[in-house]
Amino acid sequence: MTPFRAARAHHHAMGRLPLLCVFALGPALALPALAAGSLSLTPLGADGAPAVTVVDGNPLRLRAALDQPAPRTLSITFGLDDGRTLATCTVPRAARGCTTAPLSTLDWFWSGAGDAQPQRRLWAEAGGERAAASLAVTPRPVVLVHGFMSDHGTWAAYTAADGFLSRAGLHGWAVGDGQAEGSLDTGALSRLRSATKTLPENATALQRYIAGVKRRTGAQLVDVVAHSMGGLVARYYVARLMGGRDVAQLVMLGSPHGGSDCSALATTLGVLGPAALELRPSYVRDIFNRGITRRHGVPFHLLAGDAIAEGFRAPCSDVPSDSVVSVASASAIPGDVMRLPVLHTDMTASAEVFHRRVLPLLRRGATQAADDAEAFMGDDAPAAQFAQVASGHVEAGSRVEVEVQLDDVAVAAFALFDPSRELEITVRGASGRTIALTAREHGLVKVDDPASLLTLGYGFANPRPGPWRVTLFAPRQATDYALSARVAGGAVLRAEASPASAARGQAVQLGAELRHPAHTLQAVAMYALVRQPDGSTLTLEMQGEGERRGVAWRATQPGLHGVDIVARARAGDLPLERHAFLAVEVRP
């Protein structure tokens, strides 16, 4: 080889050397896995301190730490023992750890199958190394909210030492039980004429109680289970008073989201206000539901009782119903609805309701998404029709007779509210014959629980038109009473107040229309009885032509007013009467 060729060959070999060196050194640059035991995992509580226990739903942060500075940027993955990945964080090169953003522990206490898991294992993984940590999890507190004319005792089946909740490994907090500050006042038989708290005032009491439960347990989220009017109280709390979400989910049993027509008994008697007025369908529909619309992410679950399907067996509500709240009312707002054949007063003691509805939701459901706004889902169907609602007083040892004029109706159902629960009742039909009431033929029911809004009910299918007479006898003690006759068929009375919420001194237009599907009505007359917050009443004659009447009224007292519209007319040879019940809120 000539010197020139040798030098050229040497040059080419040197030119190729750097590339050859790169390939030769490539495997030497592979980064080693972390040394065994070099990674650790620590759960951190809200205060930043290491946590060994957490209440289901409370936020938690996870910290991964290395025993040596990271040789490179590392990505840490965190997970739970059920295989779910929770979060990631990044350790910069030369750093010794990283911490996640706050994580929700909602539903960590329960497995996907609904089994309690009081101990959970967390893991962190990076660079082929895995670390684990144990965490004790306690369930969310369950706050129980009672309804109208009730107290915390209605939840005894839930809160007893061997009750529904304890057998499921849960603890119940019934508002008013003294475990935390705050109690509702929704009325009681022992103080019929004392003013109750309003829905906003009761919601404020619930706010205090939930705050006390959170302080005592360290929980940041609670589950709320409410019965009847308690559902309206809880809805107000969620919409107006909840400062940051602290209700994981709201379960409502027989709550009257469209109101309860049975409230007419108490309001006609002038007792248990303003709570009884707040149960009027017109109040719930036209005032409450229009203002209480926010859910702030809280899922709503609704239970509707449909134990009563025949109209004559429902003393004061449309059917199907639980005897006090119709299915249409219990499901009148958007939500997850279940129907069960249970009566209103049995809901808080029913093992079926607990095991089929409440417990499955406590074990899941809190993470479900919820629409933030709700809308009343009522339709244009008329309110329940009443041929009579009468009230009065019976002296001890005396009798009082109430005459109810029935026209050509398909159903007549009667309800009695008797605070003494001792009145003896005798019924004579339009034929003048005394009727022996039975449960089978007339749906006769006697109710001991005052939360039902009535103490006795019965009814008739296709009753004979004419005057029906109900005699009330007080054998031992004097008592007040209210008697209603709900009808289906025949004349229909529609009434409205505009506006339903008015400023003090503002004109409110009261209007009503009475129609009959088969007759042109004659001798139509109407008046409005206004029940003011101080207990006084105003009677306003309604003027107009044909089947429609109206009157303007200016309120001088702030507060909630009950407005009873009474219409009388003749349909052919039959006299008829209908009552409608409105509520008007007067702002100061």
Image (cartoon, rainbow, N blue to C red):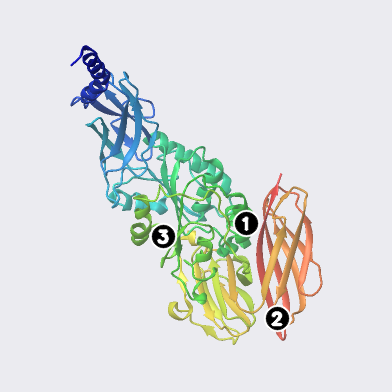
The amino acid type found where label 2 is placed reads Pro
Q: Distance between the residues labelled 2 and 3?
A: 41 Å
Q: Name the residue under label 3.
A: 347
Which of discs 2 and 3 lies nearer the camera? The answer is 3
Residue 197 seen: no
Which of discs 2 and 1 lies nearer the camera? The answer is 1
Q: In this view, does 550 lie above or below 360?
A: below
Q: Which of marks 2 and 3 is nearer the N terminus?
A: 3
The tag on residue 283 is 1
The amino acid type found where label 1 is placed reads Tyr
Looking at the image, which is closer to me, 206 or 93? 93
Q: Distance between the residues labelled 3 and 1?
A: 24 Å
Task: Tell me residue 52's x, y (percent).
Answer: 28, 31
Q: Mark 2 points at which residue?
A: 575
Label 3, residues with CA under 10 Å away: few <14, some 14-19, many ≥20:
many
**Is there CB contact under 8 Å for labels 3 and 1?**
no
Secondary structure beneath disc 3?
loop
Instruction: Determine the image quadrant of residue 390.
Output: bottom right
Residue 534 seen: yes
Task: Tell me residue 396's x, y (percent).
Answer: 55, 66
Q: Which residue is drawn at 52% across and 47% down?
A: 295
Q: Residue at x 61, y 60 (%)?
A: 267
Secondary structure beneath disc 2?
strand
The amino acid type found where label 3 is placed reads Met
- Picture quarter with the N terminus: top left
